[in-house]
Image (cartoon, rainbow, N blue to C red):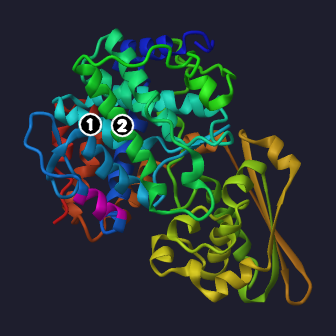
C-alpha cells in the first residue's frame, strides 16, 4: 500500500491488522537483537548526566499502569519509563539507525513500547508485533518524506509509530487508534533545531520525549479522548504544516512474502557516533594501516551530500565543544580514529574532541562532496580519505557499504560481544548470559516481565 490518500486510515488499518504470524522469522530475530542492543547501550550510559536527570524525573508510581526504570527496577508512570529508559538507550549514539532519504533512530522508541507491554502484561509475541509495526511506520516515512531538510526532527514520525505500537498493546480498536494517531501528531511537531549548530544534551532526549508523547497519546485514546480530525490532510494538518502541502507515498506492508520489514533493515551501530560517521571511521582505520598518523600534513575526505549536510556543514562540527556535537562530527570521527587508532565511548569520556592535536589536524582537513558518491546513495555509501604526508606523498583509502550489507548487519556473535562490552562492570557474566538467552527466547515468553526482571544494576 503506497498511495497518499487517507494515510491516517491506512496507518491505523496496518497497526490494527498486523499479526505476529505476518512477520518472517528473520524479522522476529531482528526485533529480539534490537532489544538486546538497546539494553546494552542503555546500561553503558547509566552514569551519563542526562540518564541521571531522566531517572530523577521519573517519580515512583504504584498505580496499575506502571513500568520499571531499567537498572533501578523502580516503578514509575508508563510515559516516564518510556522517557527515562529511552534517554539511556539514545545518549551514547550507539543505538540503531535508519538513513535513506531522511534519518531516524527507531530504537529511541523501543523502551516506550516495551513499557506499555509491561504495564499491560503482554507476551513477547505481542510486544514484538507492536515493535515491528512502530519500526515500519518510522522507516517508511524516512524513505520518502524529506522532513529533516524542511526543518522537522525525527520524533515527528517516531511519535506516530509509538502511538500505534502502544495502541495495539492497549487493545485499542480502529476508531481509538485513529484518535491516538491524531493525538500523537497534532500536538507534537518538533523542529530540527535539536540537531543544528552546537548540540545540547537534548539531542539524546528528543526521540525519547517523542516516545513519551506517543505513549501518552495512546493512553488518552484508551480513556476515550478524541483527537483532531483530518490530522494529515486538514487545512493545518501534517502535510500542510511540515511540507507545504506536498504529499509523499508512504508504503506499508501489502501482505507479500518478500516485504522487507524495517525492524530487519536498520543499522546496529559499531561506533558511538552519528550513522553517517560510521563509514568514515571504517575508512580511516583502513588508511591508518598504511601510514604513520604523525606524518600527515593534510587530509581530504570525499563523501556524499547528505553525510556532509548532517556531519560537516555546521561550523560547530569543526571544533566541537560538547559531546553531543562531537558524536555528530565527521571531522572529529575521522581525525580521532587516525590519531588514536580507535573511536570509542572512552574517546568522549576523555574529552578528545577538545584536545589540541585533534583540533590541529581538523584544521588541516577539507571535506569534498562528490556528485558520483551522492548519486550512488542510498543503495551505496562511499567514502575516500586521502592523506598528504610530510614528504609530499599522497595515500588514499576507499570504503563502501551497501544497504544490503547494512541489512545483513551484525552476526549474533558480534552483537553479543557488543552487549557484553557495553554492560561490563554493570552486569556479571551470569547476568549477561541470562539477558542474552532471554532476548533469544522473547517470542516464547508469556510476559515481557521475564526479561525486565533481569535488567538490574547492582
Q: Is residue 236 left or right of residue 159?
A: right
Of callouts 2 and 1, which one flags the residue occurring earlier in the amino acid sequence? Answer: 2
- Give the residue pinned by disc 1: 442
The answer to whether marks 2 and 1 mark residues whose Cβ atoms lie closer than 8 Å is no
Q: Categorize mark 1 by other alpha carbons within 10 Å: few (<14), some (14-19), many (20+).
A: many
Whether residue 227 is situated above or below residue 323 in the rendered picture:
above
Residue 134's label in the rendered image is: none
Q: Residue at x 24, y 23 (%)?
A: 170
Determine which quarter of the picture holds residue 161.
top left
Whether residue 96 is situated above or below residue 221 in the rendered picture:
below
Q: CA distance from mark 2 to mark 1?
A: 26 Å
Residue 441 place in picture, x, y as percent: 26, 37
Whether residue 269 is situated above or below residue 133 in the rendered picture:
below
Determine which quarter of the picture holds residue 160.
top left
Element on which disc 2 rests: helix
Of 231 and 37, the residue lying toward us: 231
Residue 21 appears in the rendering: no
Question: Residue 55 in magenta?
Answer: yes
Q: Quadrant of the N terminus?
A: top right
Looking at the rendering, the stretch of residues picked out in magenta corresponds to 50-56
Q: Residue at x 41, y 29 (%)?
A: 184
Question: Residue 18 in magenta?
Answer: no
Callout count: 2
Residue 76 place in picture, x, y as percent: 17, 46
Residue 119 place in picture, x, y as percent: 17, 34
- Give the residue pinned by disc 2: 213
Of 429 and 298, the residue lying toward us: 298
Q: Is residue 407 left or right of residue 345?
A: right
Q: Is residue 393 left or right of residue 40?
A: right
Whether residue 72 is situated above or below residue 32 in the rendered picture:
below
Of 178 and 306, the residue lying toward us: 178
Q: Residue at x 29, y 50 (%)?
A: 436
Amino acid at each position: 500500500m503506497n498511495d497518499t490518500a487517507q494515510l491516517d486510515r491506512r496507518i491505523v488499518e496496518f497497526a490494527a491488522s498486523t499479526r505476529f504470524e505476518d512477520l518472517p522469522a528473520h524479522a522476529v530475530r531482528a526485533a529480539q537483537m534490537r532489544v538486546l542492543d538497546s539494553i546494552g547501550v542503555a546500561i553503558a550510559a547509566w552514569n551519563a548526566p542526562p540518564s541521571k536527570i531522566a531517572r530523577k524525573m521519573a517519580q515512583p508510581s504504584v498505580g496499575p499502569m506502571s513500568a520499571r526504570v531499567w537498572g533501578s527496577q523502580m516503578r514509575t508512570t508508563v510515559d516516564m519509563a518510556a522517557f527515562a529508559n529511552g534517554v539511556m538507550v539514545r545518549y551514547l549514539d550507539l543505538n540503531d539507525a535508519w538513513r535513506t532519504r531522511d534519518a531516524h533512530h527507531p530504537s529511541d522508541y523501543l523502551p516506550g513500547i516495551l513499557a506499555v507491554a509491561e504495564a499491560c502484561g503482554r507476551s513477547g509475541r505481542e510486544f514484538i508485533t507492536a515493535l515491528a509495526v512502530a519500526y515500519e511506520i518510522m522507516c517508511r516515512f524516512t524513505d520518502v518524506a524529506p522532513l529533516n531538510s524542511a526543518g522537522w526532527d525525527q520524533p515527528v514520525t517516531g511519535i506516530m509509530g509509538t502511538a500505534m505500537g502502544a495502541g495495539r498493546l492497549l487493545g485499542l480498536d480502529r476508531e481509538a487508534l485513529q484518535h491516538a494517531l491524531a493525538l500523537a501528531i497534532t500536538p507534537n511537531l518538533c523542529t530540527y533545531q535539536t540537531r543544528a549548530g552546537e548540540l545540547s544534551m537534548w539531542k539524546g532526549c528528543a526521540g525519547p520525549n517523542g516516545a513519551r508523547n506517543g505513549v501518552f497519546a495512546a493512553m488518552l485514546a484508551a480513556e476515550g479522548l478524541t483527537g483532531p480530525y483530518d490530522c494529515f490532510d486538514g487545512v493545518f494538518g501534517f502535510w500542510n504544516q511540515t511540507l507545504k502541502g506536498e504529499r509523499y507515498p508512504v508504503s506499508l506492508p501489502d501482505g507479500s512474502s518478500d516485504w522487507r520489514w524495517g525492524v530487519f533493515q536498520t543499522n546496529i551501530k559499531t561506533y558511538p557516533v552519528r550513522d553517517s560517521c560510521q563509514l568514515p571511521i571504517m575508512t580511516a582505520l583502513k588508511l591508518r594501516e598504511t601510514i604513520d598518523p604523525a606524518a600527515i600534513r593534510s587530509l581530504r575526505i570525499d563523501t556524499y551530500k547528505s553525510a556532509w549536510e548532517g556531519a560537516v556543514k555546521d561550523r560547530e562540527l569543526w571544533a566541537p565543544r560538547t559531546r553531543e556535537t562531537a558524536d555528530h562530527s565527521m571531522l572529529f570521527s575521522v581525525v580521532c580514529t587516525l590519531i588514536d587508532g580507535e573511536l570509542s565511548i572512552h574517546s568522549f569520556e576523555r574529552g578528545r574532541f577538545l584536545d589540541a592535536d585533534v583540533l590541529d589536524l581538523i584544521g588541516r582537513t577539507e571535506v569534498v562532496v562528490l556528485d558520483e558518491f551522492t548519486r550512488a546513495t542510498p543503495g551505496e555509501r562511499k567514502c575516500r580519505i586521502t592523506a598528504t604526508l610530510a614528504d609530499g606523498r599522497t595515500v588514499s583509502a576507499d570504503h563502501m557499504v551497501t544497504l544490503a550489507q547494512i541489512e545483513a548487519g551484525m552476526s549474533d556473535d558480534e552483537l553479543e560481544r557488543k552487549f557484553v562490552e557495553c554492560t561490563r562492570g554493570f552486569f556479571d557474566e551470569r547476568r549477561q548470559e541470562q539477558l542474552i538467552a532471554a532476548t533469544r527466547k522473547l517470542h516464547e515468553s508469556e510476559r515481557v516481565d521475564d526479561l525486565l526482571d533481569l535488567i538490574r544494576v547492582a
